């Protein structure tokens, strides 16, 4: 064993001396409503409070069109300062707003128009769409007065928070809620009606760090859905009116048109997404609403297990792990889209099942000598996974339809499973002796950022 790996094992063993069982209450497997009390909705990009209504005759009308995701035009000029009517025509598929630096705001649903009166000072006025992620994706603009030197549309000194380069821990952040990693049982029957309720809420993703996450069913990742080949799945996607954003869902295990079931729904709406499980595997589902990167990075992803029609053989323990990344914004706000969009990804945390190091604090249990199956999904959105468990060999691997079976002719095994974003697999293994077996991505620069858990065989002490 390398010196580096030895230090990892020693560190993991020390931490594991004080552990507790990982227990998280979950709703019934076929009803994925929000878990727990409704959390606070994520705040939009910060803007001043709305001013008193602007009254008086308008000097003219300015027409702006919003598309997904931009304004046309985004730079406008008026002849002189004063009151103007601004009409926003939303030709996109998502709800947008136009929020001015003085707090004036108008909201337009998809396919609708809205008009507001705004007082444009001599120095001009900037505007943006305050829906989280939309301004970062390019929905910013400015109205200038002819002959002035107003702030350009690209500046961030009005209508939004200053760029954040680092997020400091908050000692008052609530403790995280562990995610139960036990793989759920196969859903009974052959047709499954599943309520998948979207919830926007606060969630602690590491000690001291809270994020305004967007979720399926109130958890990150969303609930694990387990069916078999030939089953019909009817997803009743619900976006409560208390939410702020439009959302959607894309099941990689399905074969449906992108512009049919996968379209976005506004708050207060719901839709049916019906598909048939034709292929076995470990599949991803996620929100595809623009910008999809932001919705995935902010927690909207989950795992679907489709078993072969004949099923999988029984094992002693089954777990489901989803690897993903957090790109922190300000405390209590959604993740930073600009950080998640960087060409060279630098996540603040890489985690299993949404929370940094939670299975180091709460090891996954198995009996010594028993058989273990782990379903693995890399939700990304950006970095690869090299899934590895220290001290073990995978005797069975099923990755993206390619299999390594126990007892093969050459007695081959596997030491790590490489997964790009949106790829899934399952592995099977045995722990021949009592002890602690660290669960990591073998991209070791991320182990120190939260991608570390423990598999505990027996009492965890190999010397007893």
Image (cartoon, grey):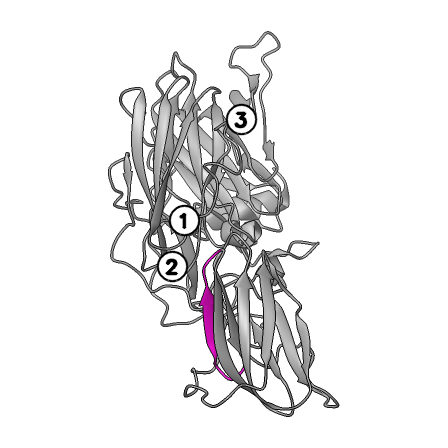
**Would you say 151 lies left or right of 6 here?**
right
Q: Which residues are magenta?
A: 101-110
Q: Quadrant of residue 59?
A: bottom right
In the image, residue 154 sits, relative to residue 50, either above or below, namely above
- Between 308 and 278, the one lying in front of the other is 278
Q: Which is more foreground, mark 2 or mark 3?
A: 2
Callout 3: few (<14), some (14-19), or many (20+) C-alpha neighbours within 10 Å? some
Q: Is residue 105 magenta?
A: yes
Q: Which is more foreground, mark 3 or mark 1?
A: 1
Secondary structure beneath dot 2 equals strand
Q: Residue at x 33, y 65 (%)?
A: 40
Name the dominant secondary structure of the magenta segment: loop
The tag on residue 220 is: 1
Q: Is residue 273 magenta?
A: no
User: What percent of the width, then of the height, locates residue 72?
Assistant: 65, 65
Q: Are marks 2 and 1 in contact (CB under 8 Å)?
A: yes
Say which residue label 3 marks: 393
Figure label count: 3
User: What percent of the width, then of the height, locates residue 382?
Assistant: 61, 47
Q: Earlier in the sequence, mark 3 or mark 1?
A: 1
In the image, residue 115 sits, relative to residue 272, either above or below, namely below
Say which residue label 2 marks: 203
Q: Quadrant of residue 170?
A: bottom left
Secondary structure beneath dot 3 equals loop
**Would you say 314 lies left or right of 48 here?**
left
């Amino acid at each position: 064993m390398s010196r580096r790996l030895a230090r990892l094992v020693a560190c993991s063993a020390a931490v594991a001396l004080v552990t507790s069982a990982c227990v998280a209450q979950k709703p019934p497997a076929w009803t994925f409503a929000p878990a727990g009390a409704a959390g606070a909705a994520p705040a939009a990009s910060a803007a001043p409070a709305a001013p008193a209504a602007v009254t008086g005759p308008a000097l003219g009308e300015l027409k702006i069109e919003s598309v997904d995701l931009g304004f046309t035009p985004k730079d406008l000029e008026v002849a002189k300062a004063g009151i103007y009517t601004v009409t926003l025509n939303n030709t996109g598929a998502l709800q947008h707003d136009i929020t001015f630096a003085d707090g004036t705001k108008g909201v337009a649903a998809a396919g609708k128009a809205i008009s507001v009166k705004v007082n444009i000072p001599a120095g001009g006025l900037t505007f943006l769409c305050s829906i989280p992620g939309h301004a970062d994706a390019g929905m910013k603009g400015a109205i200038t007065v002819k002959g002035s030197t107003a702030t350009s549309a690209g500046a961030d000194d009005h209508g939004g928070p200053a760029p954040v380069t680092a997020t400091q821990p908050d000692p008052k952040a609530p403790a995280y809620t562990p995610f139960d990693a036990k793989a759920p049982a196969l859903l009974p029957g052959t047709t499954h009606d599943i309520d998948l309720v979207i919830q926007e809420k606060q969630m602690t993703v590491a000690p001291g760090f809270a994020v305004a996450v967007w979720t399926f069913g109130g958890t990150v990742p969303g609930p694990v859905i387990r069916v078999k080949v030939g089953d019909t799945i009817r997803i009743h996607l619900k976006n409560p009116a208390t939410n702020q954003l439009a959302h959607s869902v894309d099941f990689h295990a399905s074969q449906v048109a992108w512009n049919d079931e996968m379209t976005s729904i506004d708050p207060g709406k719901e839709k049916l997404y019906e598909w048939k499980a034709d292929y076995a595997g470990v599949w991803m589902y996620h929100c595809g609403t623009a910008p999809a990167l932001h919705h995935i990075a902010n927690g909207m992803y989950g795992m679907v297990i489709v078993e072969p029609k004949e099923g999988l053989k029984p094992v002693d323990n089954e777990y489901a792990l989803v690897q993903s990344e957090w790109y922190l914004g300000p405390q209590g706000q959604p993740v930073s889209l600009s950080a998640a969009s960087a060409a060279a990804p630098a996540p603040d945390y890489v985690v299993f099942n949404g929370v940094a190091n939670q299975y180091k604090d709460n090891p996954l249990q198995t009996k010594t000598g028993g058989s273990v199956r782990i379903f693995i999904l890399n939700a990304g959105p950006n970095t690869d996974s090299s899934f590895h468990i220290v001290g073990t060999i995978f005797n069975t691997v099923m990755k993206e339809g390619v299999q390594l079976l126990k007892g093969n002719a050459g007695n081959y095994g596997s030491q790590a499973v490489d997964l790009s974003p949106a790829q899934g697999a399952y592995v099977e293994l045995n722990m021949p002796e009592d002890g602690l077996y660290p669960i990591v991505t073998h991209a070791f620069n991320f182990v120190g950022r939260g991608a570390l858990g423990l598999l505990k065989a027996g009492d965890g002490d190999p010397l007893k």
